[in-house]
Image (cartoon, helix red, strand yellow):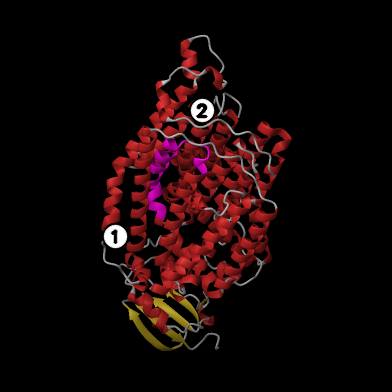
């Protein structure tokens, strides 16, 4: 048992060190005591960076063993150190946040809620039995076993389980954990997932802290962490929650870039977008939509000065090597349920209008079914905030809402044009995939409020 | 990549809610009527933000005792060994000792197949049974062709009806057997 937990610790330490090095290269960390507050962001970025890098390493045919992960980490840290020392990136100085008694009270209460919910999640992850959901048994865990036992993406084994076209980041990260703990131990994975979830909350707090008064950011994230859609899934081994973390983090940093166009935010955006892309096929679609929306908004705001945002395309481009790997190894690359949607056939499309409406109703209706109305509150508050801030930061606010709207439309259109029966299928998938919309909306809402408070009317 | 934009002013504290009138210097288009100024003003936005924060905080706080109880209960729950916790999740589907026994019965380098019958009343559906046992039997090589298999794991299926000769049959649990086949690739 000691070896297992030491292995977990070593695994997490690698993510943390790699992430700090990346933040150093981006100019966000300067290896000072004050940088300890970046622990969540460092872990999240390190996890995304190592996940993407090890996935690419495996696609290149290199065996994955603990030493491979260590080498990838050392090389990344070295590269980041060189970049950080030779070409240090400068961020504008942070504005000091004035404190007030109500502000301090909100931070203390919000912080206490976050701490209690996080501690409860950790205790639950250590003590409760992991949930062996069907998708996990039939797709994600077997592929993690392939990575762990065979040390490479064995095409024959990979394609013998359902949905081989799904990208490999989640199984690779599970397999990496198994390598470090020295065995196939799915019961320790909820601990890793919970750490990742808490890291996301801390990362969101520190990213918002630069632009949002704490009396706004702490209550928002306190409500998010106690939302059933979020808290119960902190332990979930399905990749949907991971996808939500990566895309919401990508959305935060790219929206920040629209306000403060510094290369650090683009670098973080690429890391989160590529990890989201390699987590699920939906991640690729949502990441691409985010990049397109941010590019359009960037060109509206900054014209030619927005050209560096084209680097964000590297995120969804992480799908290219995966498609190449599938093609090279003759592994089925597309879902037959979506193979022949006959999108140019007017008759087919006319027949699917009803299914599209049904899909939209299901996606938008699912969050309203809980007895605790936190999810509904997050969505309603998000809508109210959008209406309030759109005059001050029209481009940024419209970009954020457009991205979330496009994600919903894209998901509904995909399901509507499939051959899958929407009823039972959606009862399982819609709440899971919908988590990305809720988490993104919940973290973008305080950011929009904070940016609007700092901005004069209509400038952004 | 860097093209910094001048930093905006410092953020507001909630006590500014008291000041409803929009400050003239904040870039707000100055409406003629008080109502327009009220809607366009920055203080109005601070008031909305304060209201939102208060609602969020109240909702979050009311839910926190529930999570505290869940966390406390789990903190004091008896701890399982990791190896038991790995297997316990499968109790929901089927007795787990057959799954663990299959790992000991079938050699690690063997090629095997899984044959699912319909003789069990509360058995897993065929697809799920195959997924669960494949998970436990990795890294053994799985094949769907029984003629290429060295071993067969039979799940609620009589070995006599496998259609291939076999030499050994090991009982792993109710309805579950590991059968060493006479066919299959020899290693």
Q: Residues within 10 Å of mark 1 (few under 14, many from 20)?
A: some
Magenta portion: prevailing SS class: helix
Q: Quadrant of residue A128?
A: bottom left
Judge whether residue A298 is colored magenta: no
Left or right, B98 with reference to A423: left
Residue pictured at 49% horizontal, 45% vertical: A206
The magenta segment is A207-234
Badges 2 and 1: C-beta atoms under 8 Å apart?
Answer: no
Q: Check the image and name the residue furthest to the bottom.
A: B167
Q: Is residue B21 above or below residue A398?
A: above
Badge 1: chain ID: B
Residue pictured at 35% horizontal, 80% vertical: B172
Taking the image as drawn, is residue A167 in sight?
no
Residue pictured at 55% horizontal, 72% vertical: A66
Q: Residues within 10 Å of mark 2 (few under 14, many from 20)?
A: many
The quarter of the image holding the C terminus of chain B is bottom right
Residue A255: % across, % down:
57, 39
Judge whether residue A227 is colored magenta: yes
Left or right, A427 with reference to B2: left
Which residue in the protein does label 1 denote?
Answer: B75
Residue A389's disc is 2
Residue B63: % across, % down:
30, 43
Element type at mark 1: helix
Element type at mark 2: helix
**Nearer to us in this view, A17 or A233:** A17
**Nearer to us in this view, A437 or A364:** A437
Q: Check the image and name the residue furthest to the right.
A: A304
């Amino acid at each position: 048992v000691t070896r297992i937990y030491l292995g977990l610790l070593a695994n997490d330490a690698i993510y943390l060190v790699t992430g700090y090095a990346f933040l150093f290269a981006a100019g966000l960390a300067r290896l000072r005591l004050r940088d300890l507050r970046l622990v969540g962001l460092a872990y999240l970025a390190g996890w995304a960076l190592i996940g993407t890098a090890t996935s690419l390493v495996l696609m290149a045919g290199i065996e994955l063993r603990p030493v491979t992960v260590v080498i990838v980490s050392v090389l990344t840290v070295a590269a980041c150190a060189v970049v950080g020392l030779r070409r240090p990136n400068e961020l504008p100085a942070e504005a000091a946040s004035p404190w007030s008694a109500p502000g301090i009270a909100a931070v203390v209460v919000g912080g206490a809620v976050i701490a209690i919910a996080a501690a409860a999640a950790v205790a639950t992850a250590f003590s409760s039995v992991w949930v062996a959901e069907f998708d996990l048994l039939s797709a994600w865990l077997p592929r993690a076993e392939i990575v762990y036992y065979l040390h490479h993406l064995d095409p024959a084994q990979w394609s013998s389980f359902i949905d081989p076209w799904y990208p490999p980041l989640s199984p690779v990260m599970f397999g990496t954990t198994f390598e470090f703990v020295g065995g196939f131990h799915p019961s320790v994975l909820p601990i890793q997932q919970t750490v990742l979830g808490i890291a996301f909350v801390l990362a969101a707090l520190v990213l918002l802290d630069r632009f949002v008064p704490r009396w706004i950011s702490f209550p928002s994230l306190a409500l998010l962490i106690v939302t059933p859609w979020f808290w119960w899934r902190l332990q979930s081994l399905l990749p949907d929650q991971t996808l939500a973390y990566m895309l919401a983090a990508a959305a935060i940093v790219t929206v920040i870039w629209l306000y403060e166009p510094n290369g650090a935010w683009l670098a973080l955006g690429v890391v989160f977008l590529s990890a989201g892309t390699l987590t699920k096929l939906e991640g690729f679609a949502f990441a691409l939509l985010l990049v397109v929306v941010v590019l359009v908004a960037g060109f509206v705001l900054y014209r030619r000065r927005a050209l560096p945002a084209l680097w964000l395309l590297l995120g969804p481009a992480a799908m290219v090597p995966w498609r190449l790997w599938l093609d090279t190894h003759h592994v089925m690359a597309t879902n037959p349920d979506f193979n022949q949607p006959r999108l140019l056939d007017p008759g087919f499309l006319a027949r699917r209008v009803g299914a599209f409406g049904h899909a939209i109703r299901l996606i938008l209706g699912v969050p309203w079914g809980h007895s605790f109305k936190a999810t509904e509150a997050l969505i309603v508050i998000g809508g109210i905030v959008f209406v309030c801030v759109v005059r001050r930061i029209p481009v940024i606010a419209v970009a954020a809402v457009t991205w979330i709207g496009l994600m919903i439309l894209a998901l509904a259109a995909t399901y509507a044009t499939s051959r899958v029966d929407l009823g039972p299928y959606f009862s399982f998938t819609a709440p899971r995939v919908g988590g990305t919309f809720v988490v993104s909306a919940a973290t973008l809402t305080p950011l929009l409020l904070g940016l609007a408070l700092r901005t004069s009317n209509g400038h952004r | 990549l860097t093209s910094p934009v001048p930093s905006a002013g410092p953020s507001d504290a909630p006590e500014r809610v008291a000041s409803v009138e929009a400050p003239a210097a904040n870039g707000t288009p100055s409406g003629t009527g008080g109502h327009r100024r009220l809607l366009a003003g920055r203080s109005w936005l601070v008031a909305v933000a304060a209201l939102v924060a208060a609602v969020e905080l109240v909702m979050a706080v009311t839910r926190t005792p529930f999570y505290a109880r869940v966390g406390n209960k789990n903190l004091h729950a008896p701890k399982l060994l990791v190896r038991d916790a790995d297997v316990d999740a499968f109790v929901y589907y089927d007795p787990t000792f057959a799954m663990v026994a299959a790992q000991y019965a079938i050699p690690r380098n063997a090629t095997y197949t899984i044959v699912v019958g319909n003789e069990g009343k509360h058995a897993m559906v065929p697809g799920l049974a195959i997924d669960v046992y494949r998970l436990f039997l990795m890294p053994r090589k799985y094949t769907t062709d029984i003629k290429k298999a060295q071993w067969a794991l039979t799940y609620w299926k009589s070995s006599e009806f496998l259609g291939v000769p076999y030499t050994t049959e090991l009982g792993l649990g109710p309805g579950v057997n590991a059968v060493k086949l006479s066919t299959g690739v020899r290693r």
